[in-house]
Image (spheres, helix red, strand yellow):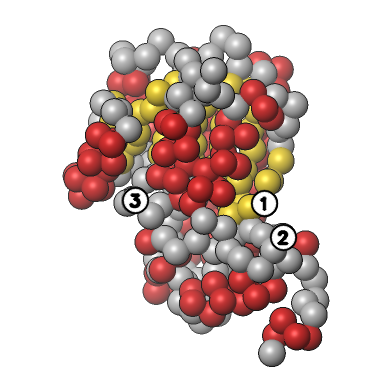
Amino acid sequence: MSLMSGKKGLIMGVANQRSIAWGIAKTLAENGAELAFSYQNDEFKKRLKPLMSSIKSDNSFECDVSKEASEFNSIENMFEKLSKVWNEIDFIVHALAYSDKEELKGKYVYCSRENFLNSLDISAFSFTRIAKSSLPFMSSKGGSLLTLSYLGAERTTPNYNVMGVAKSALEASIKYLAMDLGKDNIRVNALSAGPVKTLAGAAISGARHVFRYSESVAPLKFNPQLKEVGDAALYLTSELSSGVTGNVHHVDGGLHSVAIPKQENLE
């Protein structure tokens, strides 16, 4: 039997076929999961529909996580629409983040207040809102909430700037949500992938340098592929990780474990 047979879940944040969210969705579908998707606007919907067709998924919902609860495309209204399709869900994958790309270059000290607030709202607080809104629909047996982080939450990386602060807030949220929801057997974890060539990653200035450095310094000497990230997500959303919560799981070739790389790795 497939690991995710009989499981239903929501994927939030697919931008295109190179998205980490899509790598995860594809792996979960291949292992028997029934998936629904959210999209921000019509432009993203157009990219998403062919991908959904490839895994025979029919359910998608417009959702802009920056909107107030009363608006038609808010988080809260999306779950209300989802409840009319499914009685319950078993997992959610939150792959949403935002920052003004002009502030993903240079120094963090020049971050604007507006972008700081927007970045924290969309990249971190949205996960908490989603967790709260999903509670009435989460499986009676419990479930899994999974979000995406990055090493820039733990230590500085070039030009990651306010996104590093937002991901740090997200990782702290994971721990508090894990404590709040554990009694309901709802597990809350993050997957911290190494550099992956995605649309979001390309928005960060100097991304090629980070990609090359990570590849040379990581103990396994490679950056992860979508399949490797998808396989890790399969573990974190399936019963294989039934005893795991409040955890940040790294899929970065071991890069997070390196303090000072060997000299030959820098030559």
The crowd level at tag 2 (other Cα within 10 Å; few <14, some 14-19, many 20+) is some
- Give the residue drawn at x 44%, y 64%: 197
Q: CA distance from mark 1 to mark 3?
A: 22 Å
**Tag 1, which secondary structure?**
strand
In this rendering, the label closer to the viewer, 1 or 3: 3
Looking at the image, how many numbered discs can be counted on the residues?
Answer: 3
Q: CA distance from mark 1 to mark 2?
A: 8 Å
Please say if 7 is above or below 240.
above
On the image, numbered disc 3 is attached to which residue? 17
Badge 3: few (under 14), some or many (20 or more) residues near its Cα, within 10 Å?
some
Which residue has dot 1 on it?
250
Q: Position of residue 89 (x, y in %)?
A: 47, 19
- Element at badge 2? loop
For residue 134, say whether it is visible: no
Is 28 on the left or on the right of 67, as rendered?
right
Q: Disc number at residue 254?
A: 2
Three-letter residue code for mark 3: Gln
Say whether residue 204 is left or right of residue 212: left
Which amino acid type is marked by label 2? Gly
Q: Position of residue 66 (x, y in %)?
A: 38, 44
Residue positioned 40% across, 68% down in the render: 203
Gap between marks 2 and 3, in whole Å?
A: 25 Å
- Between residue 9 and residue 6, name the one nearer to us: 6
Q: Residue 183: in sight, yes or no?
A: yes
> Residue 262 sits in which quadrant?
bottom right
**Which residue is found at the position 47% from the left and 41% from the top?**
24
Q: Which mark is residue 237?
A: none
Q: Nearer the viewer, residue 27 or 151?
A: 27
* Quadrant in which the N terminus appears: top right
- Check the image and name the residue furthest to the front: 1
